[in-house]
Image (cartoon, rainbow, N blue to C red):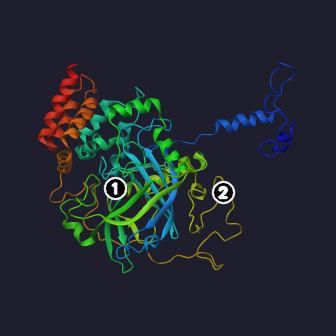
Amino acid sequence: MTTQDELRPTLTTEAGAPVADNQNTETAGVGGPALIQDQLLFEKLAHFNRERIPERVVHARGAAAYGTFTVTADLSQYTRAAFLSEVGKQTEVFLRFSTVAGNLGSADAVRDPRGFAVKFYTEEGNYDLVGNNTPVFFIKDAIKFPDFIHTQKRDPYTGSQEADNVWDFWGLSPEATHQVTWLFGDRGIPASYRHMNGYGSHTFQWQNEAGEHFWVKYHFKTDQGIRNLTQGEADKLAGEDPDSHQRDLRESIERGEYPTWTVQVQVMPAADAAGYRFNPFDLTKVWPHADYPLIEVGRLELNRNPENVFAEVEQSIFSPAHFVPGIGPSPDKMLQGRLFAYADAHRYRVGINADHLPVNRPHATEARTNSRDGHLYDGRHGRQKNYEPNSFGGPVQTGRPLWAATAVDGPTGNHATPAHAEDDDFVQAGNLYRLYSEDEKQRLIANLAGFIAKVSADREDIVERAVDNFRRADADYGQRLEAAVRELRKQ
Ligand code: HEM
């Protein structure tokens, strides 16, 4: 044994007993079968079999980093959230980026929205803003989400993503036309996680100290500049370097090049909502900046890599229902569905005590609940009483709701999202198309046509419905797309 070896710690079993041999299984005789008394062998094989937890049902593939949010402008006239209360105030954050449809081991450089999930570890509890790099979404009602995702994921028979399913669903869901026009444009494949914007996407409620409330949309503008990949560049990169985005984020932070985003909000006074030209709670619509300008609120910097990907990234949990005082939900039906879906996913995927893990628990305050026990409970509450009300000095409620109550009216029912004066499913898709440069229009048409052309030859009806939605957004858009698809399907 060298001196070096003598300094090294002894390898042990899970129970801490020294391991004599980590190379050779114990056998009955030389060259004989293994013995049950080799508990090290069984312990290793059994633990290995249980290394995986279920991957996220969407957004399985991702990368994350810690950082700091700094307030740069005082917006306390709109919200009483403590972490936004004064210029210069800093809050620790954890941001996980992701793709949506791919499995855990899929490539980063693909055409897909990117998740942009931020956890603010505030002194009033963790605030999670679980957004995307797109300001809108494909659908406007949570009840359609499982069906939509089924079309993006693997077909039950072929086990692959199928153009038939994707275009069938989109063709039958005209509200997707805006987001699809966005996704197949240049920003549909970001060059890296650092070179894209993030959006809260939904409308949220802010409430100020006086009790007034506002409707708010969040924008995170990359300070690195927007950079994208063309379909050809992405196809090559995805094959050669499937971990491209994950590596780029980690290495830039290792080099001390900390990516930053300027955080802005659009604020709508509550009284405007009913008469606004678009339904402000429809996730397939933006609020044009001319109507509600961007107001800067802060700067977000990422500056620390996780030490352990499984512990901190795979087991991290973000929930749109994690609000803090002064911030709350809007009646957006997508958001309302998400308020249930995430915590439910966490209980299944990570377990009932997922909130106790270091990455997930509050960092700037502590959780004080009477929930107890369950799998892998660490006994943190000791002998404290586990019920309320109690007369033993346990934690008590504040009596003040986190956000403002809003009025409702009318009968219950499976109502469609109400349409405001200028609402239809095509107007903003057409506006976006007309905003693109001629070059970008050509790439958009080529990207869409390349995918639509893959629809089965005997399902022209799917192609027709899909193209018709783009025609309704803009006649030129539809006509050029139809010609490009026909050309490709002739080949
Ligand atoms: C009703 C519609 C939606 C439902 C039911 C839904 C459901 C889910 C579920 C179950 C997960 C996995 C959570 C986990 O296992 O930790 C997830 C992840 C995610 N979703 Fe959604 N989602 C919806 C819409 C959206 C929208 C509109 C956005 C963005 C604006 C979004 C952004 C994300 C992100 C970023 C993640 C990954 C979070 C992380 O990094 O852990 N989702 N979603």
What x and y, as percent, mark residue 384? 68, 70
- In the picture, which quadrant includes the N terminus? top right
Residue matched to label 1 = 201
- Quarter occupied by residue 413: bottom left
Vertical order, 194 against 74 (above or below): above
- Res 491 seen here: yes
Residue in the image at 66% along x and 71% along y = 385
Q: Is residue 57 left or right of residue 210?
A: right
- Upstream in sequence: badge 1 or badge 2: 1
Residues at marks 1 and 2, CA–CA distance in whole angstroms: 35 Å
Residue matched to label 2 = 377
The extreme left residue here reads 475
- Quarter occupied by residue 130: bottom left
Q: Is residue 96 left or right of residue 461?
A: right
What x and y, as percent, mark residue 387? 61, 70
- Quarter occupied by residue 102: top left
Q: Nearer the viewer, residue 56 or 183?
A: 183
Vertical order, 466 against 258 (above or below): above
What x and y, as percent, mark residue 44? 73, 36
Q: Name the element at disc 2.
A: loop
- Res 199 seen here: no
Residue in the image at 18% along x and 51% along y = 424
- Residue kind at label 2, given as amino acid type: Tyr
- Residue kind at label 1, given as amino acid type: Ser
What x and y, as percent, mark residue 266? 30, 64
